Amino acid sequence: MVTDVNRTFARLERRTERIVSVVRLLALCVLVLVFWSLGVLDSRHAAAVPLGGFAMITLAGLVTARRSLYLPWIPWLLGSLDVLLLIHCLVNLANTAGQPLHLVLDTPVALLIFVFLATAAVRHRPFLILYTGGLFVAGWIAILLVLPLVGSGSWPSAAFADALGRLAIVGLVTFALFVAVTRARRTLTRSLVEAHRRANLSRYFSPQLVDEIAKSGSAARSFQPQSAAILFADLRGFTSLAETMPADHVADFLNDYRRRISRPIVEHHGTIDKFIGDGVMAIFGVPEPRADDARNAVLGGLAVVTAIEKWSAERIAGGLPPLQIGVGIHYGDVIAGPLGDEQRLEYTAIGDTVNTAARIERLTAALGESLLISGDVLASASDLERDLAWVPLSAHFLRGRSQPVQIYRPDWTASSVLPALTMSR
């Protein structure tokens, strides 16, 4: 996840580099105007180094902004050249105009340091801001201390204090920008991480449940009773199939399998609760129950069966073994909510309804059926009997239950099943 966030910041920096180059171009225009007004342009040597230097840095920034050429250390190099060239420009300007060095800090050219600090802030790099401001302040302090030692005369105390005061302002602005960008980057990082997590969750969960899980990360709500439809699906003969496949092929097979069955479940407002090998548990009706949860579960189950049958036909055409899946669905009361601790949290449902749905799924293998539902599913969605043809099977005593459960299977030969299959795809 950290790598993804870093990549996002890197993409932002590459785009920002173009903006920074435009800012440098405007700074170059300011230099030309100031030099023209002060007559510095008359001295080609005095104007060539700063103007040519800024032009080359601007061009270098535009060239390196390309993805293939951009490297993380390039902003540090360009920032260093910006500051060093600005200091050279100010010293050169003072010598050409015959002014004391401390006075050039009052010129518009000296204000360009704030432009360079702003460009460092735009890059979302707090320490680059500190480096830029610190390099400028350190450079001027070095000049203030070294010039008297090389015989250029001593600084008047008032002039020295005036220069230090201006440098202190640069330092304060640098620190303020550092704090602001640090906090902004931290906030943006949290937002990117949250967006990445939600994107991953949304691949298997409904948008409503993604919001619920995101909120429960800091304050998990307690389990609460509600009604829901539970779907269990399991691939027949997977153990025997996996024995004939290399380990990496098994992983690829499971990834493909899970992708194929996850899509129809999510498309019918279901939530993938968990994968256990080739088995899956899905919930329809969390975090808030809907009137059509049972219907959505059945249509989702039909879509899962259809997806696996289509995949099986593709495998047979390619000379591979066929596939068959068993889907069991039950509707009733569950206890749903987030379960876990600070390290790992999952949103799940527990209760007799879940256990019964699992038992119905296992019954599909014994009866040789692809999909079975309980009578409670039909009772909670009366339009299922109107829209689809169902064949009642004898009531079954499921393990762990004292009362028998009425079981139904779709009448695959009835024409009324075909529209439902088309609808569920």
Image (tube, grey):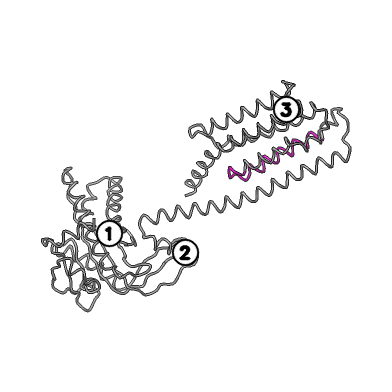
Query: Mark 3 or 1 closer to N-term?
Result: 3
Where residue 371 appears, as percent x and y from the top left, is 19, 63
The Cα–Cα distance between marks 2 and 1, rounded to whole angstroms, is 28 Å
Of circles 2 and 1, which is in front? 2
Whether the magenta-drawn stretch holds residue 142 is answered as: yes
Return the residue found at the far front. Answer: 37
The one of 218 and 183 positioned closer to us in this rendering: 183
Of circles 3 and 1, which is in front? 3
- The residue that mark 2 highlights is 215
Q: Residue at x 16, y 64 (%)?
A: 410
For residue 36, the mark is: 3
Amino acid type at mark 1:
Gly
- The residue that mark 1 highlights is 279
Amino acid type at mark 3:
Trp
**Quarter occupied by residue 349:** bottom left
Where residue 361 appears, as percent x and y from the top left, is 22, 65
Q: Residue at x 41, y 60 (%)?
A: 210
Query: Mark 2 or 3 closer to N-term?
Result: 3
- Give the side of residue 183 with respect to residue 336, left or right: right
